Image (cartoon, rainbow, N blue to C red):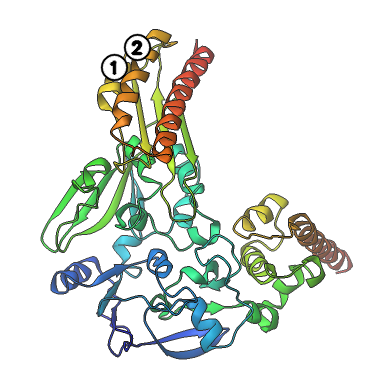
Amino acid sequence: MPGNVIKLRFTLNERPVLLQCHPGSRLLDVLRNDFGLKGTREGCARGECGACLVLMNGVAVNSCLVPVFALSDAEIVTIEGILSLKSFADIRKGLPEGDVYRCGFCSSGMQVALAALLLTDPEPREQEIRRSLSGNLCACGNYRGVVRSVIERSSRKRRYGRRRIERS
Amino acid sequence: MAEGVLKEVRVFRPKSLGGTLRLYTRNPGALLYAGGTEIARHAQRGSGRLLELPQKLIYLGNVQELNRISRGQRYLDIGSVLDLSRILSIGRNVLPPVLFETLSAIATPSVRNLATLGGNIALRACRGDCLPALSVIDTQLELRTAGSTRWVEVGEFFDGRNLPGLRPGEILTRIRVPLEEWDFAVTRKVHGGAGFTTSLSFVGVARFPKGSIEALHFCIGGLKDPVFRMPVLEERLKNASLPIQSKLIDTLFRDLADALSDQVEDTPRGHYRAATSLRLFRWFVGKINIRSLDFL
């Protein structure tokens, strides 16, 4: 059995990739070991901590719970993609700055969860932000700071948008 | 039929239900998957342990018939490979409240984006938390093979060893949820430990239009039986006038305690589960009594 391989085509950070790996691997293993994308972290490995979140077809999923054979034709965006791709430029404006996080272990998972929220709702309310972060464990416990930062950024965006409309 | 890119392990990605059933009949050893959360949990965990998989895998996520939700006057038909987030997106006003509450309490939003209702019901490795909620509202499951279709109730779905009673070549295709109205519904989930363990859960619904109980159902999950219901006890409460007399409650409580003693192991954990189930039942009946006062 360990000699088994599977070949898959999928999109990773907007680039088509062809992967050959053991069929019993998880997306998390592939991202970290085969593609060197270390921003996606392994925490609990059972979908509880949210450190390994990635965007799969536009929704946040735990990469530790995605078997590699489920990746065929999927579109995966990791934290590296969110922080660098042009198509995520607007989303990045709504994400908290790095200094909001303390130790930083949960930061990539939280950023992905917030990016998934901002993709569907660019100006989320506090309750929605809290709900979207309900799958992310932060040992430092700075949820309030993260939520406040997202609210501030979205209200700043709203004010800026209003000013632009008034000018025009 | 489209076939995934492969060398030794083959991934089939059928698009129609007919094609899927025929494929599964031809390859009875194939592994069916949609969300894949349970499979990935058993995969490599940083320790180099690799999951052994059969040579053929069938992905159900592209099958249109399994991805549909349709609403009739009396039922809501939910395709078995719909993920929990999509089912929850139907909304609190359409889904029965017990089902909405139960699904909202399963795992985290990102896991609910992957996990499917069919997986929650038909997994062999662990029993889903949605079973009590589905059973209490008399949900039916559609099971299909290439040549036959049958409907079973959630409680009848499990065999003598409490494993999903699927026949060779059979697939869980649809979950038919009745849209009956209930005056009162409660769900309580007591966490059983680490992730993917079955929680102790209590779900109860009742209808009492004219000062007496017209129908009362309750179901407990996380015991030896995947879904534990007591139709005899439910029948005894039928037509009972409200508020329910404490003498009747005590009798029912004793009967339930007797029945629960067979449902738990003789361990501290088992005793805790039985005692908590009894407390939840008493709380449920007490709540009905309080609620009935509002109706009077």
What label does residue B240 carry, if any? Answer: 2
What label does residue B156 carry, if any? Answer: none
Q: Position of residue A73 (x, y in %)?
A: 42, 81
Residue beneath disc 1: B236
Q: Position of residue B35 (x, y in %)?
A: 40, 65
Disc 2 versus disc 1: nearer the observer: 1
Query: Contact, CB < 8 Å: mark 2 with mark 1?
Result: yes
Question: Can you say which quadrant of the picture contains the N terminus of chain B?
Answer: bottom left
* Left or right of residue B218: residue B54: left
Q: What's the CA distance linking mark 2 and mark 1? A: 8 Å
Nearer the observer, B25 or B107: B107
Q: Amino acid at mark 2?
A: Ala
Q: Residue at x 51, y 18 (%)?
A: B291
Disc 2 sits on a residue from what chain?
B
Q: Position of residue B61 (x, y in %)?
A: 35, 68
Asked which secondary structure carries label 2, the reply is loop
Q: Is residue B104 visible?
A: yes
Asked which secondary structure carries label 1, the reply is helix
Q: Is residue B96 visible?
A: no
Q: Residue at x 59, y 58 (%)?
A: A135
The image quadrant that residue B228 belongs to is top left
Q: Amino acid at mark 1?
A: Arg
Q: Residue at x 35, y 58 (%)?
A: B119
Examine the rendered structure and indicate whether residue B218 appears above or below residue B224. Answer: above
Determine crowd level at label 1: few under 14, some 14-19, many 20+ residues with C-alpha closer than 10 A: few
Nearer the observer, A109 or A148: A109
